[in-house]
Amino acid sequence: MMFPQSNSRHSGSSHLPQQLKFTTSDSCDRIKDEFQLLQAQYHSLKLECDKLASEKSEMQRHYVMYYEMSYGLNIEMHKQHQQQVLGAIERAKQVTAPELNSIIRQLQVHQLSQLQALALPLTPLPVGLQAPSLPVSASSGLLSLSALGSQGHLPKEDKNGHDGDPRPDDDGDKSD
């Protein structure tokens, strides 16, 4: 390679400015300072990385705790729902025919009071005219069911308090 020639070479003395003079010890000191700066930056970044890693671990731990709690709560709610359903089924199994008839009668009374509250004509209709027909609803369907019950399709209580079970009287033959 060719180096540009400078006037200082021709004069025989080296009068380079002070900033361009580099000695080995100055270069080593500069390299040492830069290395220490890089080490400090590395240490700072390593601490920040460790801090972020611990925060990540903590967040994961919280997430797992949240997930476990949510899962447990979901299972508990499901168990409670099942218990409520089982309780309702058991109560429904214990309903007897007389209780069912009583409920139907109560619904009929309630339905009749609702029908009376409607704006029906209070004057009697002329002969040959019929009252307007009412729409069929779920509650009027219960009237039909109760009518079936009163016609003998559901067991009735007899005068001795039995539920229509064909049992012999206690006064009859007893076999001991």
Image (tube, grey):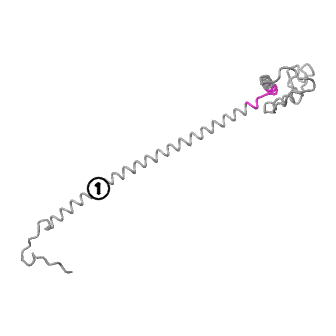
Residue furthest left in the image: 12
**Secondary structure type for disc 1:** helix
Find residue 77 and report its image quarter.
top right
Q: Is residue 39 above or below residue 113?
A: below
Q: Please indicate whether residue 43 sits to the left or right of residue 74 in the image.
A: left
Rendering coords of residue 102 (x, y %):
80, 24
Give percent across and percent down for residue 80. 63, 35
Image-quadrant location for residue 81:
top right
Q: Position of residue 19 (x, y in %)?
A: 14, 65
Residue found at x 86% / y 28%: 147
Location of mark 1 (residue): 41
Q: Amino acid at mark 1?
A: Gln
Magenta stretch, overall SS: helix
Residue 98 picture quarter: top right
Q: Position of residue 130 (x, y in %)?
A: 89, 27
Residue extending farthest front: 126
Locate the C terminus and report the quarter of the image it occupies: top right
In the image, residue 101 lies in the stretch drawn in magenta: yes
Q: What residue is rendered at 63% in x and 38% in y?
A: 79
Which residues lie in the magenta part?
Answer: 91-104
Near mark 1 (Cα within 10 A), the count class, few <14, some 14-19 or many ≥20, is few
Q: Is residue 162 magenta?
A: no
Tell me the quarter of the image containing the N terminus.
bottom left
How many marks are shown on the rendered structure? 1
